[in-house]
Structure formats: C-alpha cells, structure tokens
Image (spheres, helix red, strand yellow):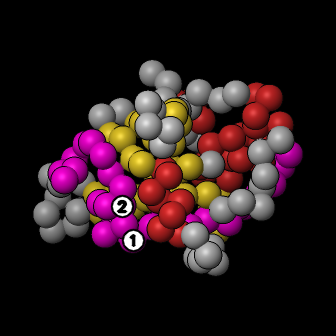
Amino acid sequence: MNHSATQDHSSREIFNMLAYRWDITAALALVEGREPNAVISVADAAMWLPLIVINQAHAAVADLSKPLLVAPIHDPKKAAQPFAGYLTIDGWHRIYRATYECVETLPAHLLTTEEERQIRLEGGRAH
C-alpha cells in the first residue's frame, strides 16, 4: 500500500498515510520563517520508504537543506501514554535522496500537537 503527497483540486498539497490526511500547504505556512527545531535520522525515517510513492526524477533534485515536516502521532487507545511517535508528512523525496547519498541526518520542523491537529484533514479525531 503506497502513499504519497498529492495536489488536490484546490491546489493544496495533501499528504495521505493510511486513513490520515494532512494539509501540507497549511503546515508550511505555520512554520514559515522558523528555524528547524529537530534533526531526523535518515536511516530511521527511511524504514517507511516502502510505503511511499517516490518520483525518482523529483528525488534526484530534492533540496536536502529544506527542513522536513514531522508530525507527532498519538495513540487514542492509550489514554495514560497516548504518544506513539513521529511521522514525516513532508520530505519523503529528500529522505530518499539522502539515503542514496549516505546523508545521515536532515533538518526538520517538528510540529506541536496543536499544530498537527490544525492541519489534519482526516483520521483520528480530526476536526
């Protein structure tokens, strides 16, 4: 099952993963002008690449200096410890390129829980 970022009918970039959808255009607006606040391990992120549709021509020119967008993921079944981890929601072509160029880390914007909720279109408890 492959998932990728797509352009919807309103020209907004949307990232889909399983039953979830995030508005990447809105997320990029939230982080505009901010310095990256995280560094992501390419090897850790790359384990999800088999689930992502990669355009190799686009990946070949992906700007590795552009920060990834990473969203916190929560497990609603675990009220005491709801945190399940992080998911890259923008930057898979950069991760793919970094993997093949042996780049170990990439800069990232780690969204807050509130920011993730603002940009989530579907899945979980989307508004």
Using the image as rendered, state which of residue 81 and residue 7 is in the foreground: 7
Q: Is residue 84 left or right of residue 53?
A: left
Q: Disc 1 vs disc 2: Cβ atoms closer than 8 Å?
A: yes
Q: Which residues are magenta?
A: 100-127
Looking at the rendered structure, the kind of residue marked 2 is Glu
At 86% from the left and 45% from the top, the residue drawn is 101
Circle 1 Cα neighbour tier, 10 Å, few/some/many (<14 / 14–19 / ≥20): few
88 within the magenta span:
no
Q: Which residue is mark 2?
A: 116
Q: Position of residue 73 (x, y in %)?
A: 35, 56
Magenta stretch encompasses residue 105: yes
Q: Which mark is residue 112?
A: 1
Image height of 97 relative to 104, above or below: above
Q: Residue visible at 70% across and 27% down?
A: 55
Query: Residue 61: x and y, percent?
Result: 83, 41
Rendered residue at 36%/33% (across/down): 18
